[in-house]
Image (cartoon, helix red, strand yellow):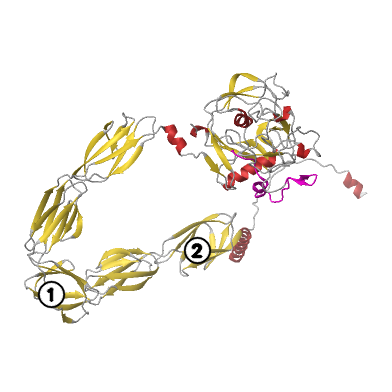
Amino acid sequence: MASKKLDETEISATEFQPINTPITRQSRKISSRALVLISLTSLTIIIIGVLMVSRSVVFITSPNDAEISIDGLSFNIGNNFLLMNTTYTVNATSDGYYPYSQQLDIKNAYVPEFLIELEPLPGNLLIESDQSPIEVSLDGNVQGMTPLTIEDLSQGLYDIELKKYGYFPQSKNVVIKGLGETETLSVALEPAWGDMIFITEPPEATISVDGILKGKTPLTTQVLETGSAITIEKAGYNKFEEVIFAKANSISQHETIFLELADGEISIVSNPIGASVTIDNKYAGTTPMDTTIAPNKPHEIELYLEGYIKESRSISLKPAENREIKVSLNEDIGEIYVDVSPEDALISIDGIAMSTGSQNLRLATKKYKLSVSKNGFETKTISINPRPEIPQAVSIQLITTEESYWASRPGVIRTPLGNKLKLFKPKDEVFSMGAPRREPGRRANEAEKLIQLQRPFYFALTETSNKEYRQWKSEHNSSSIRGLSLDLNDQPVSNIAWQDAALFCNWLSEKENLPKFYNVVGDRVTSINWDSNGYRLPTESEWSWVAKVTKAGSTKVFPWNSPSYPPPFVSGNYADESAKSMLPFTISNYNDSFPVSASVGSFQPNEKGIFNLSGNVAEWVNDFYEIRVNKSEPLVDYRGPNTGNRHVIRGASWALGSRSELRLSYREPGYDGKIDVGFRIARYVDKPKGDL
């Protein structure tokens, strides 16, 4: 009941009133021990952090006691530094050394050990002596005279040389420490002289030692052990000069010096100059000249000059007397009469033109070069030597330049093999090569061409023999037919191709040191050097001119002097009755007694002196084969076409005998060798510009 009563009690609100009593808070103090602990902990954390981001570098210095300083945050124990990953400036110093400074990039170029070498300061060397001045050289270079300080010498060994007149030279090795210090070298040289007494006769002569005047004799003076140049002079006497030696630190006396009376001096001048001079019959020189002669005695002086009369002078001089001798030379004249042809030729003496035509020359008696000249003629020079009172005469006849040219070119030359070639100068003759259409036996390949030969040439008298050819190709065989040999030494070579004949010509040129005519690649002719005067095959134009054209300028049909066929007499080696058994055609009632080839040079030559141009063997010529008519302007020195695959063969042979074949216009093409085809050689006289 009571609780119910309680629950029914009414609760009413009351107004809040704050408590005014203050709240008391208790303060707490941190002890000093805790603060120390906190500080140590923080420092440890910082040190650990620095150690984690830094690197250790040991600095090694030379010298060891160098002091190191680093710009920037670092820690070190001695020369062991802890450095951050950044760039530092490292400085090092030591007494006696240049300061050191270097950038060190720890981040990008870290090294655990860093070598620092300080450069030592140079040193100075003071050289002093009680004998100053003394010349000082350092390593061969003169530095000056003592007392002397040589500055800024790097550490090292030096060679010091000391010199002074009158003393022995001295060498020393000096070690320079450097480090800014000055070292002192005191030196003393040993005397190199001895005292020597000089007496002269006569006395009172002045004496000099090494160019230094010492006094008059008799005299005691110093002379070097290494030798002193002694000069003694006295008026009226010849100078005494000699190198004399004296032992150092000694006293000695030179033997008495007897002075000779002074020579006289003469100057000799002549007009004209260049005269040879003899004194007492001994050659002395040429004018103008100075010389000496012995005094107080007579001398004979003579002057000689070619073309001038000799002059003589007698002279006597006192001691040390000077005199000039002037001599005018007179010409010694001789006469020479010079007769010249042509009449208007110019006469020159030693290159100086006189006048034209024959004349009398009055010349000084000496040797001259006399030249006679005229345009278009060869200058002739001779030596002449006019003589007084002996008139002379010379006759000089000039020859033209062309005559002189041909006079130096022989009419016949001989090869190293012995084959002879004859010189021909066609003189611009124009002739017809080939045959007229109406000539009996004419063939279609004999078209006429007008030819003019200008360039002189040599042409072989005979064909090339087997013997000559085998000196080039020893194994060659010209073959045989029906047991009859074509290979005897004196028979013409045959059975050869055109290429072989051309290469033989080159070989022969080489033996005679002539330029090769044929340009060869491998063993084939590829082109021709027309400027060459080496051996070659004749051109077809040359062969035709030599064979057909007479000295009178007419042309022949056959080798014999008749236009009729067959040959009226034995004139060559053709297909004759002796070869009837082996040839399909032979000439009736003709027997030359040679069924095959005859020896080269057989039978009579033509009027030009050439053998077997028709008969014996047909002949290779230089030209490529072609058929072309030319009757307009003459072809000058015609060489044939520039290209082709076959070459021309000219002339008949021992195997040919028909009317057509025996004509001098007969020609055929060929490539390979045949048993009745050979060749002969030719060559030009000179290059084209040298021919006249």
Which quadrant would residue 162 be assigned to in this image? bottom left
Query: Which residue is disc 2 drawn over?
Result: 116
Of discs 2 and 1, which sits in the foreground?
1
Which quadrant would residue 180 be assigned to in this image? bottom left
Instruction: Verify whether residue 469 appears in magenta.
Output: yes
The residue sitting at 33% across, 37% down in the picture is 396
Magenta stretch bounds: 460-486
Q: Return the x and y of residue 510 as percentages of the image width and height.
A: 59, 46
Q: Return the x and y of residue 543 as percentages of the image width and height.
A: 62, 32
Per the image, label 1 sits on a secondary structure element best described as strand
Which quadrant would residue 121 be assigned to in this image? bottom left
Per the image, label 2 sits on a secondary structure element best described as strand
Query: Which residue is disc 1 drawn over?
Result: 257
The residue sitting at 73% across, 39% down in the picture is 676
Instruction: Verify whether residue 268 appears in magenta.
Output: no
In the image, 307 versus 494, the foreground residue is 494
